[in-house]
Amino acid sequence: SDALRLIIMRLLLLWLINSAALFAIPQLLSSVQIDSFTTALLASLALGLVNTLIRPVLVLLTLPVTFLTLGLFIFVINGLMFWAAADLVKGFQVDNFGAAMLGALIYSLLSWALSTLFLRK
C-alpha cells in the first residue's frame, strides 16, 4: 500500500542521511576513519542495531549513575555504542574512547541537522 511504501522510503532516506553524517565525521575528527561510503552505510546500520538492541539494556543498568550525573553518563553510553559499531564494521576505525565519545556527539548533531533539513513533515 501507499502508507507502507512511504514508511519504507522514509526509512531508506533516514539510513542515507545517517550514513552521510557518519561519512562526514573523518573530515572533522582525524581519530575516526571510514574507508568508503559503503562502509558508512554498513556502519550506520550497525550503529542502528547496536543502539536498538544493546543501548536500552545499558541505559537501564546504569540508571543510578545516569541519575547521579544528571544524565551526563548518557554521553558515555553513546560513546560506547559508537565504539562498538566501529569494532563490528571493517573499515570503520575509532582510535580511542575519547574519539568515540566525540564522534558520537558529532554524529548525533549532524544526523539531527540533516534529518531536520530533509525529513520535514
Image (cartoon, helix red, strand yellow):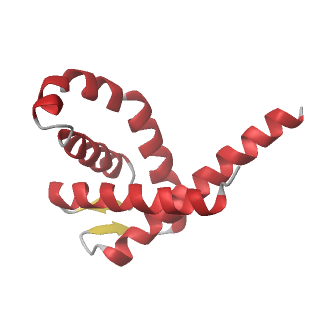
What residue is at 52 percent from the left and 56 percent from the top? 18
* For residue 113, side relative to residue 33 (left or right): right
Q: Is residue 96 visible?
A: no
What residue is at 73 percent from the left and 41 percent from the top? 8
Quadrant (top left/top right/bottom left/bottom right) for the N terminus: top right
* Residue 17 on image: x %, y %: 57, 59
Q: Is residue 64 visible?
A: yes
Snapshot quadrant of residue 71: top left
* Residue 62 on image: x %, y %: 18, 26
Judge by depth and name the residue closer to the eye, 69 or 23: 69
* Residue 90 on image: x %, y %: 38, 55
Judge by depth and name the residue closer to the eye, 92 or 118: 118
How many labels sit on residues?
A: 0
Residue at the right extreme?
1
* For residue 54, side relative to residue 95 (left or right): right
What residue is at 70 percent from the left and 46 percent from the top? 10
**Relative vertical location of residue 115 with respect to residue 67 in this rendering, above or below:** below
**Relative vertical location of residue 89 with respect to residue 33 in this rendering, above or below:** above
* Residue 23 on image: x %, y %: 46, 67
What residue is at 29 percent from the left and 73 percent from the top? 29
